[in-house]
Image: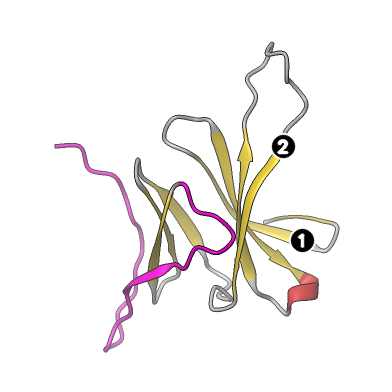
């Protein structure tokens, strides 16, 4: 995990088209809550190179697990810990509510979420 200004990045993924960098980060001032942010990616050589703009942020209190991960699909972003799985549309905004996809009733652990092409 990389940290800066009291913020620890716990997971990072590029969007499917490569136009955004998605970060799960824990802010010390928010009592360990993890937020999801999307940053616009400017290609090298573009007129906006070096001017990354912060696009969207979503804070969610239940994402406090130390082992949070991201899986980005074309229409959905999955945020998961070894015990739970949530989804969000790729075009989320600050007022978006994550949908709980899975919470086990028994002792079961999620190890990975992946894309499958058919």
- Is 94 in front, or is 59? 94
Q: Quadrant of residue 8?
A: bottom right
CA gap between label 2 and label 1 equals 18 Å
Please identify the residue farthest to the bottom as the structure is shown.
Answer: 106
The residue at the point 83 percent across, 63 percent down is 6
The residue at the point 69 percent across, 76 percent down is 32
* SS at mark 1 in the image: strand
Circle 1 residue: 7
Question: In this rendering, would 110 be left or right of 37?
Answer: left
Q: How many marks are shown on the rendered structure?
A: 2
Q: Is residue 95 magenta?
A: yes
Which part of the image, by quadrant, shows the C terminus? top left
Image coordinates for residue 98, horizontal then vertical, percent:
44, 67
Image coordinates for residue 114, horizontal then vertical, percent:
31, 49
Q: Which residues are magenta?
A: 91-118
Q: Is residue 22 magenta?
A: no
Query: Is 114 above or below relative to 29?
Result: above
Q: Are marks 2 and 1 in contact (CB under 8 Å)?
A: no
Which part of the image, by quadrant, shows the N terminus? bottom right
The residue at the point 41 percent across, 35 percent down is 16
Circle 2 residue: 53
* SS at mark 2 in the image: loop
Query: Is 72 above or below relative to 69?
Result: above
Q: How is the image coloured?
A: secondary structure
Q: Quadrant of residue 85?
A: bottom left
Question: In this rendering, would 9 be left or right of 111?
Answer: right
* Circle 2 crowding by C-alpha within 10 Å: few under 14, some 14–19, many from 20: few
């Amino acid at each position: 995990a990389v940290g800066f200004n009291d913020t620890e990045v716990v997971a990072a993924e590029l969007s499917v088209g490569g136009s955004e960098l998605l970060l799960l980060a824990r802010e010390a001032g928010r009592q360990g809550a993890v937020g999801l942010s999307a940053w616009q990616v400017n290609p090298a050589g573009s007129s906006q190179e070096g001017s990354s703009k912060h696009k969207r942020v979503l804070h969610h209190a239940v994402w406090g697990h130390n082992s949070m991960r991201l899986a980005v699909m074309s229409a959905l972003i999955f945020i998961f810990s070894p015990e739970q799985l949530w989804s969000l549309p790729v075009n989320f905004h600050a007022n978006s509510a994550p949908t709980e996809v899975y919470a086990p009733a028994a002792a079961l652990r999620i190890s990975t979420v992946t894309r499958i092409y058919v």
